[in-house]
Amino acid sequence: MGKTIAIANQKGGVAKTTTAINLAASLAVAEKSVLLIDLDPQGNATSGVGIDYDNLDGSVYDLIIARKPFSEIKIQTKIPYLDLLPAHIDLVGAEVELATMNSRETLLKEGLKGIVDQYDYVMIDCPPSLGFLTLNSLTAADSLLIPIQCEYYALEGLKLLLRTMQLIQKSLNPSLFIEGILLTMFDKRNNLNNQVSDEVRAHFGDQVFQSIIPRNITLAEAPSHGKPVLFYDAVSRGSQAYLALAKEIICKN
């Protein structure tokens, strides 16, 4: 049975999409079948695996709103074991359309019925907000992976997301749990980064991944080449960090 992991944080710039792309690719390299769902209207996870979102026949919008079959939308990427449900700018309007629809929080879950079990992992890249698209992700997911940047406001944003998660557990998805909290953009030479890391680990203990994603130039460069960092510079610190994270997740399951 496949496992669905939503990657979410309402705060932008925390390496959420970077994590979705590179964790999905690292799991695929480990020969785990992976479906990456790009639920962010910006479409960065789509372009980040080499797909031009201006020339799509369909997107995850069509799965949720137009109820098109999964088979008509899914794209097989150039990376073995990795499929994609791409995003399109149409998703911007989905938030407004969902507001007037019945069962609006469960449409993604319904669209993925019978699909999840075709994969070892389904990774959902959520938009940087707590709107209906993110609610759909958390309702459809088994677990939540939370990337947080090692900075002053990290814990404040985390508290809001956890409060939203608790509300979803009460009303929509009682089995939702935290897959882990991922420290990102970490620079060990920075005292504040170290302080935030220590505080997060002291507060959340084993819920924090041992793997830490460093601040690394290759992670920033790889998307411009339409590649996960593993296929851009396999020996970089960023690439090795995501391989370690994938191993950590595989060992947990």
Image (cartoon, rainbow, N blue to C red):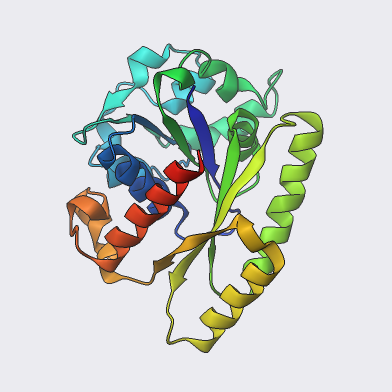
Residue 120 image position (x, y, % from top left) = 41, 28
Taking the view exactly as shown, the residue that stands out farthest to the right is 170
Q: Is residue 174 left or right of residue 132?
A: right
* 81 to the left or right of 153: left
**Is 251 drawn above or below residue 222 in the view shown?**
above
Could you tell me residue 27's position as x and y percent?
34, 41
How many marks are shown on the rendered structure? Answer: 0
- The residue at 50%/31% (across/down) is 3
| Observer-nearest of 124 and 34 | 34
The structure residue drawn at horizontal position 39% and vertical position 70%, both measured from the top left corner, is 214
- Please say whether residue 44 is visible from this viewpoint: no
Residue 149 higher or lower than 239, as above or below: below
Relative to 212, say whether 46 is above or below. above
Horizontal and vertical percent for residue 70?
Answer: 41, 16
**In the depicted view, which residue is nearer to us: 45 or 140?**
140
Q: Residue at x 45, y 32 (%)?
A: 122
Q: Nearer the viewer, residue 23 or 149?
A: 23
Q: Position of residue 59 (x, y in %)?
A: 39, 26
- In the image, taking residue 30 as reference, residue 67 lies left or right, namely right
Toward the front, the furthest residue is 251
